Image: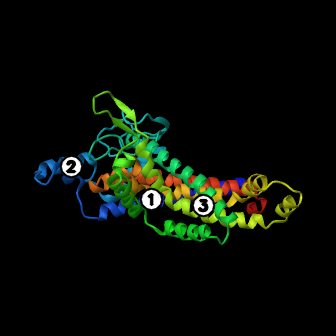
Amino acid sequence: MNLLRGIRDRLLYGIAVMLGVITLIFFLFNVLPGDPARMMLGQRADMASLESIRKELGLDRPLYLQYIRYINDLSPLSVYQLKNKGSYFYLDPSRSKALPVFTAHGGSALVLKKPWLGRSFQSRRPVGDMISEAFPNTMILALTAILIAFFIGTFLGTFSALHKDSWYDRISILVSAFGMSVPSFFAAILMAWLFAYKLGDITHLNITGNLYEIDDFGRGIHLSLKNLILPAITLGIRPLSVVVQLSRNSMLEVLNEDYIRTAYAKGLRKSRIIIVHALRNSLNPVITAISGWFASMLAGVVFIEYIFGWRGLGYMLVNALNFYDLPVVLGCVLTTSIIFVTVNISMDVLYAFLDPRIRK
């Protein structure tokens, strides 16, 4: 029961966090100077056209009504007018299939539906469709960066621990400290300039590019994995530096354990002791750090995707900010918040399941 109560509390906390983030972004965006209607029509648009677009987008309503409508659209359980098309809360059947749960007099109803993120102010496409296209690219980039950080960082950290106080160990500590402190946008610019611009004739890497590219000869879209190399390595620099430090310190602690000395006394080979006994037991803090970094990496992926032209959530978010496209901004922020909350709740539940002391 304690575990179930803990899961319930964390879910409620996660919902409260996402609602708070959406509320903050919504009102902050509406306080800042800017007019989505003028961004769509241009600076020479006449007032009649601007007012028509504002009415179509619902921007002519009071701000609190716009917020209530957005939350109502976002919620799976919503209140709508099913028949009155002139109503501000009319549910368009073409955008969301709704299942009426309770229908009251006057045509209002409580409906069960998929969350509706609205349409982009610029392209008029559903935001959910745009996110579903961009999200896989971000996940591929983040997973590749995490795998690079885990395997290379674990190897370098273990090697550093086995050669403690050597020149390599000192350089490893210095470089990993620098890697943890370097900003993501600076690392992305440096990597693009060095390996794609200066050394482009040797590396044959592009400064910008996506996972799929259109063939220059009109032969369709093809997979271009080389465009993944630079953004994945750049995104993995900071977690790799953390993994090097953690794996080194954890390995040093494990090597001082009694069972390691016993294994040496039994005459086991050093390679077997390191790989089978020491390395396996030293990976616990590394795996814990990797799970936390996977969620926090999404903050740095915004700069990296935009600089390298990788068309994921971060790239879409920056473009939406440039054009004052509030539905797209809110959709990207909500998706990122869901990932943060899901990963954190999953880790809390896993810790509570593995360690009974946390359940109390």
The quarter of the rendered structure image containing the N terminus is bottom right
Query: Which residue, given by chain and number where applicable, does mark 1 sit on?
Result: 300
Please name which of the two marks, 1 or 2, marks the residue nearer to the observer: 1
Element at label 3: helix
Query: Which residue, given by chain and number where applicable, does mark 3 sit on?
Result: 243
Mark 2 or 3, nearer chain start: 2
Instruction: Residue 26: name its quadrant.
Output: bottom left
Mark 1 and 2 residues: CB-CB less than 8 Å, in contact?
no
* In this view, 167 is above or below 20: below
Query: Would you call the spot at circle 2 few (<14 residues within 10 Å), some (14-19), or many (20 or more)?
Result: some
Element at label 2: helix
Element at label 1: helix
Q: Is residue 207 visible?
A: no
The label on residue 214 is none
Query: Which residue, given by chain and number where applicable, does mark 2 sit on?
Result: 40
Report the amino acid beneath label 3.
Val
Please name which of the two marks, 2 or 3, marks the residue nearer to the observer: 3
Q: Is residue 175 visible?
A: yes
The outermost residue toward the top is 219
Query: Would you call the spot at circle 3 few (<14 residues within 10 Å), some (14-19), or many (20 or more)?
Result: many
Residue 114, image x, y percentages: 47, 40
Mark 3 and 1 residues: CB-CB less than 8 Å, in contact?
no
Residue 136, image x, y percentages: 46, 42
Q: Is residue 304 or residue 155 the one in the foreground?
A: 155
